[in-house]
Image (tube, rainbow, N blue to C red):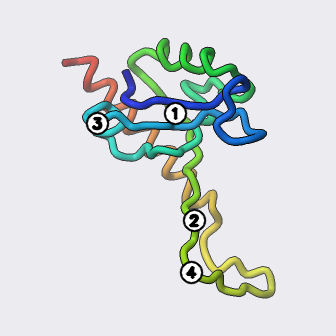
Amino acid sequence: GLGFNIVGGTDQQYISNDSSIYVSRIKKDGAAYLDGRLQEGDKILAINGRDLKDLRHMDAVELFRNAGYDVSLKIQRRLQPQNGPVGHQSDGDSGGLPLAAILVPGLVLTAAAVWILLRYRQRM
């Protein structure tokens, strides 16, 4: 397997009014654990280009089980809660990088690493 468990779906919502699929547990020494980029709480948007929106839980599980050796995941990193007071921003200045500038490269690297890891395991 891919080394992680999922929760969610239209019939088993993990978050109220959200039928998305989320990583619930990373299995120690599994592919996702060894890769190190997927985290518990991450939302999985697609697997091998197949959108996971509006799927029942078991349908999503079947997609993961039948994903094959070359697996590409599109994820949305869970947002970490901020600790401490939130600073005031004015004049529309965000004071940092756009979220997409951080998430997109991370998603690309995650997908590439999972693909490489699964290709490596296939050749063993």
Q: CA distance from mark 2 to mark 4?
A: 10 Å
Q: In what element is the residue under mark 4?
A: loop
Which class describes the residues within 10 Å of circle 1: few (<14), some (14-19), or many (20+)?
many
Q: In what element is the residue under mark 3?
A: loop
Asked if 101 appears above or below 16 in the picture, the reply is below
Mark 3 lies on residue: 28
Q: In what element is the residue under mark 2?
A: loop
Q: CA distance from mark 3 to mark 4?
A: 32 Å
Q: CA distance from mark 3 to mark 2?
A: 25 Å
Q: Tell me residue 116's x, y (percent).
A: 33, 32
Q: Quadrant of residue 95?
A: bottom right
Mark 1 lies on residue: 73
Asked if 120 appears above or below 24 in the picture, the reply is above
**Residue 41 appears left or right of 120:** right
Mark 2 lies on residue: 81
**Residue 76 appears left or right of 106:** right
Q: CA distance from mark 1 to mark 2?
A: 24 Å
Q: Quadrant of residue 97?
A: bottom right
Which amino acid lies under the numbered mark 2 shown in the image of this protein? Answer: Pro
Which residue: 50% across, 20% down? 64
Which class describes the residues within 10 Å of circle 3: few (<14), some (14-19), or many (20+)?
few
State the quadrant of the C terminus.
top left
Going by the picture, which residue comes out furthest to the right?
91
- Work out whether residue 112 or residue 73 is closer to the camera in this orientation and state it: 73
Which residue: 77% across, 87% down? 90
Mark 4 lies on residue: 84
Which amino acid lies under the numbered mark 4 shown in the image of this protein? Answer: Gly
Q: Quadrant of residue 4?
A: top left
Which amino acid lies under the numbered mark 3 shown in the image of this protein? Answer: Lys
Specify which label sits upstream in the sequence, 4 or 1: 1
